[in-house]
Image (cartoon, rainbow, N blue to C red):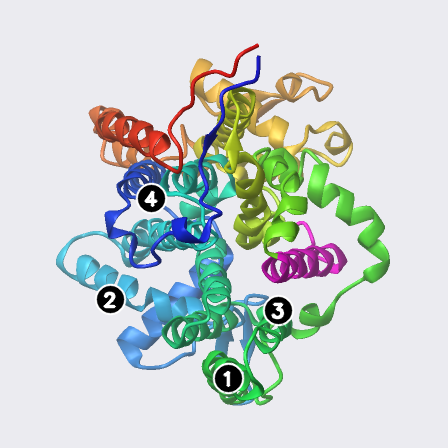
């Protein structure tokens, strides 16, 4: 007997979806709402990254003094010819942090809360809007390719909770911001209308200001625009519309670098910006994809479904598949060749995170075209496994495991240390069962019984959640149960989501047919 099959895509021209706003797409909005609740209760309440500290210090300097210089603190600051020091990190982040710095200034002025505590608490939530924006644009991109609302909602949920998008939504690294801005640019060039090209151009310009390396990806997007159907004038107009904000951003960056460092081509990273070692790719590439320390497919097993869809993606949408593949491949090779390819003191292969939606996109052309019961269960199982794989990265600070592996352990002990992925599960089990921050070497399969006392580290205590932090700092243990409110909210959203999804599934092209005769 053949398995039951029902259509989740609309390949026929008369079935093409409307590309207006997603305001009527209830299923996707339910998924976004669930992700919002999950993200809010997964935030940390503190920052973990040096980049963030110097970016918000720059924002504070702008808010309080109208200046860009900050206190001298190498190697995170560079001294300009005028003797003043400036943050070496991209200027896009300080611009975004301006309202957070202003709000923290007000809080510290009217309360006893120090500015550092206030601004870091606020900034720990700062990536959530960008993560949700990335999910929304990903849904729009899927709809653009003819995937129905139900199918798009499935993949948006998989991206939001089954990949590193979840971890970086509640991380103060800027990868969630990069993901949203990159997706906006990709969606814009594929959609190709003047309005979307203008918005996408602005998004890419901001992306460039966040990280200058994205200039290397601009030719790929431009080549796609110049090879789209239309006469030469139309193609040039589309390219100019998308390119104009990027050119302005480039001029602004050069001017800013000249003002700060006396050289328009000095990015702030010095020789690090050009420190690429192509000969190491044979070693780094397999580790970026499959290792337990930095393997993308280990940290996001759901992306295996995307690998299975490239053939169908190319067959149906060759130019767009070529665009996505070129962006993924360039990112992969650039990071594999970069001397700091691990992006250490971070969770997973963070330099690959902004491109995760493009890795997942092809799965829509296999798993969301015709479902059989077997494929449905495979998709659900892989998504569930991938979601569970995110949990240790959410509840355990990777700064804690890196501090143990790279600082606390002796050089003789480090070769026995477990991988990042394994260590996070060990830490999580200890926090839930033993419920303190005193570990023994034997817990990590390191020879010896030496104790590792991590209690002095404020951000390592307990689960890495803002509710835990607030409960501990203000001695209000009842606040630890606050995430139950989020669980109730998710349950309330899941019920109508299930009903809406069931309705959409039945009407997404064809209703469930009767089983075929044996």
Quarter the C terminus occupies: top right
What residue would you read off at disc 4?
Answer: 45
| Front in this rendered view, residue 186 or 98 | 186
Q: How far apart are marks 3 and 2 (CA)?
A: 34 Å
Instruction: Tell me if label 1 and label 4 are in contact, CB under 8 Å.
Output: no
Residue 454 in sight in this render = no
Question: Whole-percent x and y of residue 183?
Answer: 48, 59
Q: Nearer the viewer, residue 408 or 272?
A: 272
> Circle 3 sits in a helix, a strand or a loop, which is it?
helix
Label 3: how many residues lie within 10 Å, few (<14), some (14-19) or many (20+)? some
The residue indicated by pointer 2 is: 102
- Mark 1 vs mark 2, foreground winner is 1
Q: Residue 46: horizontal and vertical position, in percent? A: 37, 46
Of mark 2 and mark 4, the one earlier in the sequence is: 4
Query: Circle 1 is placed at which residue position?
Result: 234
Mark 2 element type: helix
Q: Name the residue under label 3.
A: 217
Q: In terms of sequence position, does the residue under pointer 1 or pointer 4 come before the other?
A: 4
Q: Residues within 10 Å of mark 1 (few under 14, many from 20)?
A: some
Counting every numbered tag in the picture gives: 4
Which residues fall within the magenta stretch?
318-342
Q: Is mark 1 on a helix, strand or loop?
A: helix
């Amino acid at each position: 007997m053949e398995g039951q099959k029902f259509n989740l895509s609309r390949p026929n021209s008369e079935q093409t979806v409307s590309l207006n706003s997603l305001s009527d797409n209830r299923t996707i909005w339910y998924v976004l709402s669930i992700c919002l609740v999950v993200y809010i209760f997964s935030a940390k309440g503190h920052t973990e990254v040096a980049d963030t500290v110097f970016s918000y210090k720059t924002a504070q300097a702008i808010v309080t003094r109208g200046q860009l210089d900050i206190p001298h603190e190498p190697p995170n600051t560079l001294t300009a010819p005028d003797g003043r020091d400036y943050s070496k990190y991209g200027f896009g982040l300080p611009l975004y942090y301006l309202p957070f710095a202003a709000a923290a200034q007000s809080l510290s002025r009217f309360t006893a809360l120090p500015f550092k505590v206030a601004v870091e608490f606020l900034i720990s939530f700062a990536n959530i809007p960008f993560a949700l924006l990335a999910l929304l644009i990903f849904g729009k991109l899927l709809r653009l390719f003819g995937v129905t609302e139900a199918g798009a909602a499935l993949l948006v949920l998989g991206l939001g909770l089954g990949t590193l998008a979840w971890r970086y939504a509640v991380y103060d690294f800027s990868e969630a911001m990069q993901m949203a801005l990159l997706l906006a640019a990709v969606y814009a060039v594929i959609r190709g209308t003047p309005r979307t090209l203008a918005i996408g151009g602005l998004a890419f310009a901001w992306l460039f200001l966040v990280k200058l390396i994205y200039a290397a990806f601009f030719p790929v997007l431009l080549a796609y625009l110049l090879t789209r159907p239309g006469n030469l004038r139309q193609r040039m107009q589309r390219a100019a519309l998308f390119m104009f904000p990027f050119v302005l951003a480039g001029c602004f960056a050069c001017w800013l670098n000249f003002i700060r460092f006396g050289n328009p081509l000095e990015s702030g990273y010095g020789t690090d910006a050009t420190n690429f070692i192509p000969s190491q790719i044979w070693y780094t590439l397999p580790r970026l994809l499959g290792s337990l320390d930095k393997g993308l497919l280990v940290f996001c097993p759901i992306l295996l479904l995307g690998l299975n869809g490239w053939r169908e993606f190319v067959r149906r949408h060759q130019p767009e598949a070529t665009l996505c593949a070129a962006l993924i491949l360039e990112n992969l090779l650039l990071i594999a060749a970069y001397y700091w390819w691990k992006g250490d003191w971070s969770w997973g292969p963070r330099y690959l995170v902004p491109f995760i939606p493009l890795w997942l996109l092809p799965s829509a052309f296999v798993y969301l075209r015709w479902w059989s019961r077997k494929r449905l269960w495979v998709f659900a199982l892989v998504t569930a496994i991938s979601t569970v794989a995110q949990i240790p990265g959410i509840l355990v600070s990777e700064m804690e495991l890196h501090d143990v592996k790279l600082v606390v352990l002796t050089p003789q002990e480090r070769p026995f240390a477990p991988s990042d992925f394994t260590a996070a599960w060990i830490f999580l089990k200890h926090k839930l069962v033993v419920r303190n921050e005193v570990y023994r070497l034997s817990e990590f399969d390191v020879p010896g019984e030496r104790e590792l006392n991590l209690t002095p580290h404020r951000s390592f205590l307990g689960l890495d959640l803002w509710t835990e932090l607030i409960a501990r700092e203000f001695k209000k243990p009842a606040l630890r149960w606050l995430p139950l409110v989020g669980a109730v909210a998710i349950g309330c959203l899941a019920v109508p989501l299930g009903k809406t999804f069931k309705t959409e599934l039945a009407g997404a092209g064809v209703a469930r047919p009767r089983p075929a005769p044996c």
